Amino acid sequence: MLLSKLLIPITKDLPADAKIKSHQLMLRTGMIRQSSAGIYSWLPLGFKVMKKIEQIVREEQNKIGAQEMLMPTIQSADIWKESGRYDDYGEEMLRIKDRQGREMLYGPTNEELITEIFRSSVKSYKSLPQMLYHIQWKFRDEVRPRFGVMRCREFFMKDAYSFDTDENSAKKSYNKMFFAYLNTFKRLDLQAIPMAADTGPIGGDLSHEFVILAETGESKIYADKKIFEVNLKNFKFDDKSLEKMRKDFSSFYAVTDDKYKKDEFDKNVNKSNQIITKGIEVGHIFYFGDKYSKPLNCFVDTKEGKKDLVKMGSYGIGVSRLVGAIIEAKYNNEIMKWPKAVSPFDVVIIPSISKNNNENMVKASKIYDELKKQNVDALLDDVDENMSIKFKKHDLIGVPFQIILGSKSKENKFEFKEVNQEAKILSLEEIKRKLKK
Ligand code: ATP
Ligand code: MG
């Protein structure tokens, strides 16, 4: 892509209401544009990043055997009346009437709809367990939409649902999701801590919020530093190993403020290991038994020839919130560096351009064509601006590799900058090898 042709409306001015760095940066680089309060359009740069995150989330769901599907954004109010949540959900739910006067709503989540689909299509224990997911827009009319994509009204979420015959089997599904979540966040280069969360009337310990540490987060968190030492590599993908994994994580104290008790924290965690900070919730998993299958009459035939309510769990990841969360974690001193896995481009080529010498630009175009042939997604900065302005711009766009054609490049060698490393002078062949890695 040529920078001059990319719709990337970089602005200097900051809207007064952008209080946190991710919101500021996303507006400044034109990743998003507000269309109304808490509702955003995703422009090409932001959209690319979000799609890459979505793909990683999808791959990790597929790996544990969850099946992708797609449910609509608009739902009928009927199933919500059946579950009893139509009244309970309150003003966060956007309610709509169609031309026949039927009550509809923009889905804030999908427990009811998926249960309705399941009860009409699955009858026997023989088809269980099942895990289904979709990645779809949600709408919640938040009281105070704020912080850009972090708390908006319309947002993009992966929500998965598990169906099992009994609690023991449901636990195994839960553990698989727990594992998938940790792997997903790891691939996004984020350290997410699974924190014990409230399970409500169901009880038990099967609810976790996945939180990444960030000063600008909305959740206050209390954790044992040692939780970061649990290594995912030590666990195999079988039921026993996965149960051990969850137990190992759960053996360390890690809670948000609604579960925090000072005496418990002090009793369980050495002062020197105590982390008290803020965090961003990027995912939430929950086992809730027959909370929805019961009011919605979702039964399956059991092995013993009886009928039993199906046991369910639900598992959410805030895909659009993650774009902001990654920025909160990686943006420092006016410099953004995207993790390679989600960067909007693989590499940016920055030639120094002047009116009476277009040699650098010619070479840069050749490199660009060459990389394109190798399926490297390169951005070529073909804009006629001085180098210091260019560098500032690329500090914001945040592509983690740069090829610079300026004073330091020689005949067929170019300056190559890798995130957090000293610049090197390399040939195109050497650069290609580095990018391949
Ligand atoms: P929160 O406590 O932040 O309101 P929640 O408990 O309502 O979150 P869930 O219903 O568990 O969230 O939704 C799953 C995920 O969707 C959350 O972990 C979060 O990453 C994301 N999410 C929820 N609400 C929003 C929102 N208003 N804007 C952006 N992402 C959201
Ligand atoms: Mg909420």
Image (spheres, rainbow, N blue to C red):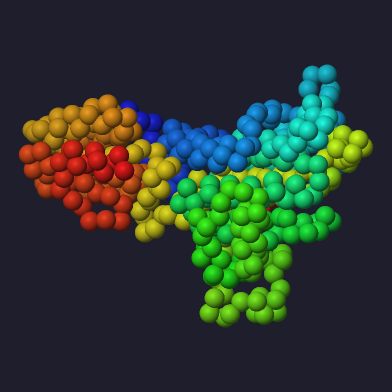
Give percent across and percent down for residue 129. 73, 38
Work out which quarter of the rendered image holds the C terminus and state it: top left
Whether residue 424 is visible, yes or no, is yes
Task: Name the residue located 50 percent from the left edge and 45 percent from the top edge.
Answer: 323
Q: Quadrant of the N terminus?
A: top left
Q: Nearer the viewer, residue 11 or 293?
A: 293
Q: Position of residue 9 (x, y in %)?
A: 39, 36
User: Residue lying farthest right?
Assistant: 306
Residue 401 position by quadrant = top left
Q: Count the marks: how many?
A: 0
Give residue 34's position: percent from left, percent from top.
Answer: 54, 38
Residue at horizontal 21 percent and vertical 46 percent from the top: 416
Residue 373, by quadrant, is top left
Q: Is residue 29 above or below residue 259?
A: above
Say which quarter of the image contains residue 274.
bottom right
Q: Residue at x 82, y 55 (%)?
A: 202
- Report whether residue 34 is seen: no
Image side of residue 384 versus residue 27, left or right: left
Q: Which residue corresponds to the image point at 69% horizontal and 46% vertical from the top-left?
A: 173
Nearer to the camera, 78 or 175: 175
Seen as rendered, the residue at the extreme top is 100
> Is 279 placed left or right of 404 in the picture?
right
Relative to 375, 27 lies left or right: right
